Amino acid sequence: MSELFKKSVSKSAMPATGTSAAAPVATAIDPVCHMSVDTSIGKPTHEYAGTTYHFCCKGCQTKFAADPERYLNPQPKAETPPPPKGTMYTCPMDPEIVQEGPGTCPICGMALEPMGIPPREAGPDPELIDFLHRLKIGIVFTVPLFILAMGGHLGLPVDKWLGARGSQFVELLLALPVIGYCGLPFFQRGIASIKNRAPNMWTLITLGTGAAFLYSLFAVLFPNLFPTEMRAHHGTVPVYFEAAAVIIVLVLLGQVLELNARAKTGDALRALLNLVPKTALRVSANGTESEVPLEEILHGDRIRIKPGASIPVDGVIDSGHSAIDESLLSGEPLPVDKGPGDSVTGGTLNTSGSFVMSAHAVGSETVLSRIVALVAEAQRSRAPLQSLADRVARYFVPAVVAVAAIAFLAWLLLGPSPSLAYAVVAAVSVLIIACPCALGLATPISVMVATGRGAREGILIRNAEALEAFAKADMLVVDKTGTLTEGRPKLTDIVCNGHDEMQLLTLAASLEAASEHPVAAAITNAARDRGLQLSAVQGFEAVTGQGARGVVSGRRIAIGNARFLAGLGIGTEQFDSDAARMASDGKSPLFVAIDGSAAGLLAVSDPIKPSARDAVHQLQQLGLTIVMATGDRRETAAAIARELGITHVHAGLLPDEKSRLISELKVRGHKVAFAGDGINDAIALSTADAGIAMGTGADVAIESAGITLPKGDLRGLVRARNLATATVTNIKQNLAFAFGYNAIGIPIAAGVLYPIFGLMLSPMIAALAMSLSSVSVIANALRLGQKPPGIAT
């Protein structure tokens, strides 16, 4: 293209030849606007790379000077990549419609939207671009149409300028592109809904605007077909082109706002995905490192993570130590120290040291991808309240059409002259004001805002049904381990009888180092924290649920409960009172024997989470009865319940017994929510009305529950409860407003106030009222995202 401009410039500068008296005008092509420029009259110029370029005005010169290459060598626009093969699409209005690949809904005609995880890079929504283009064109034609139609009321002498007939023909010409082009998608959807016998808001928009336009078209082209009493003194019949055009523009505006909101939601999800780098530093078997695209990383690959880098996939550290910023999952601002054997999550940030990890979950299997998929799924879900709205809408549209028909006949037969005009105005106004835009937005917009708010507050909502169920719950059943407590047992007490405390702990920890039991890990970790050196174990033997024994440094060591030691012929009477005290405090006592005699007592407990006390109290204040359901011993469960202020305790339960407990509570009429760690509580999570998984986003936690709290903190339950109740209240407010608006607006549009006050709505005012109702519903829903719903800190 630069050559084109050079040729144009050089050609225009050539001297004129021939016998003509007048020399040809020297011209050049403006590289910005491509207009032909007369170079002989002092137009602006700019020299670049040895060539002088000419411009039609100073504005073009300024644009060119800022970035010449943009205009000399423009780059072709990058095409939006097609969706991956197998991508499923669904209809935002009729979610039961699911198909592979893009298309339109066979029921309502709306464009289908992709399901699942959005692509990391996506171009602008083509439907949003199309509707925005139609909106701009609609405004360009509707504004002068509105001024022309309302000019007489505004004191403008429109009839004197154009004449009554001329004015109406200009209105028709201005309305044609708005109705025929800008409103075409809505008419296609409305016709599809009628064909499929699935009436919806598009049905009413099609009938209302179509009736107003066709009536006005006939009034302009064939005014003599109308009764004399319907014509004005100059022979014209009143028309409503401006009403139909304004409706189309207002509905287009609403669609653009909704599509833009959905686009921003997709951008937010993509921002989460972009926390993961696009490449990873893979370590080969011989130790060499190479940067490869993230898509090439497979399960088992070893990856080098440098300081300051984001972790690309989920996995386990093989070598090295670091501090990981896990605020993505936990919300905690302080980094967590990690070393060999510790798991790390994709999207979290390596703040300090370098380490090598093994990939255990890649692509869509990672916690981050599953979180994004969860949020995307939740924002497409429909709450039971939405089902109520859908059922009402199914009968609402035919009822509105019937009311419009009755209004038409009543005005035609009983109305004042010209009765046909009044009949048409009443029928069209009813169809327009009853457009169920607000009703259709009442639930989805609240759910969308709530799930977005929840994601920011560390509350992952799988579906709207779970949110509504938790709001209605009056009883919360909680697991103890990992929910009320840390889930990581710690050594709390050491009682000795003539033995050195550190020696006793060294021998016990050396024996337990051969065990994989969590309690054994607590004892071993306590010894290592104290810097004790452990010895090798010989002849290790473990008895499930009782204890273990073996030889450490030539001494016979046994550790376990009183029954286990009694089976070895070892008495524990001297430690029984201490063991009873520990058990009453919620601790697990373990007897230690050395060379055939009781030598000491260790106590292990699962510490209560620091936030548990305040959270339980706040949940009780929010109207929830707290029930503890645990597989632990009754004494331990009772001690923790006393400390937390929980009065209902069920201990010693197997997983299926927890589920039975929930079923029994539901039979008694309770709405039950269950909060567990999501691993051994899958049955209970699915049985409860609302299942809430506590933990760090483990696979089962995300899959088994309607709500997941990655932080594993009971304060998240308080936030979730407040968010759930606020969302349900917001939905009810929206539905009440939408139903109330129609209950009041439809009779007014039909003309019930005319006999008393002489008041009758025009179709344009009806369209404005309809749009304002939708805006009110959206504004009310957006309040959920503006104010934190009573969050405990």
Image: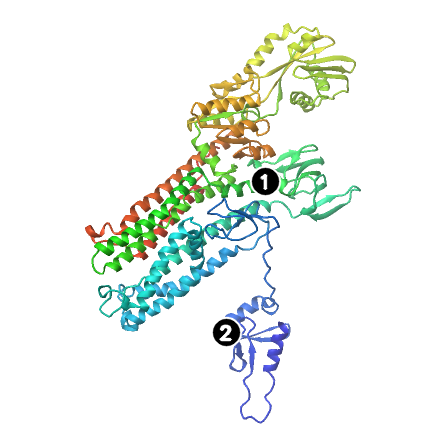
Residue 388 placed where, x, y %? 40, 39
**Amino acid type, residue under disc 2 in the picture:** Cys
Residue 145 placed where, x, y %? 35, 65
Mark 1 or 2: the one toward you: 1
**Amino acid type, residue under disc 1 in the picture:** Arg
Image quarter where the N terminus lies is bottom right
Which residue bears the numbered disc 1?
370
Would you identify the image quadrant in which residue 328 lies?
top right
Q: Does label 1 or label 2 sit earlier along the sequence?
A: 2
Residue pictured at 65% horizontal, 20% vertical:
519
Q: Nearer the viewer, residue 311 or 42?
A: 311
Which residue bears the numbered disc 2?
57
Query: In the drawing, does residue 635 fall left or right of residue 500?
Result: left
Q: Secondary structure at mark 1?
A: helix
Q: Nearer the viewer, residue 344 or 212?
A: 212
Q: Residue furthest left?
A: 756
Specify whether residue 9 is in view: yes
Q: Residue furthest right?
A: 286
Residue pictured at 78% horizontal, 42% vertical:
287
Give the number of the disc on residue 378.
Answer: none
Residue 544 placed where, x, y %? 67, 17
Would you identify the image quadrant in which residue 469 lies?
top left
Q: Secondary structure at mark 2?
A: loop
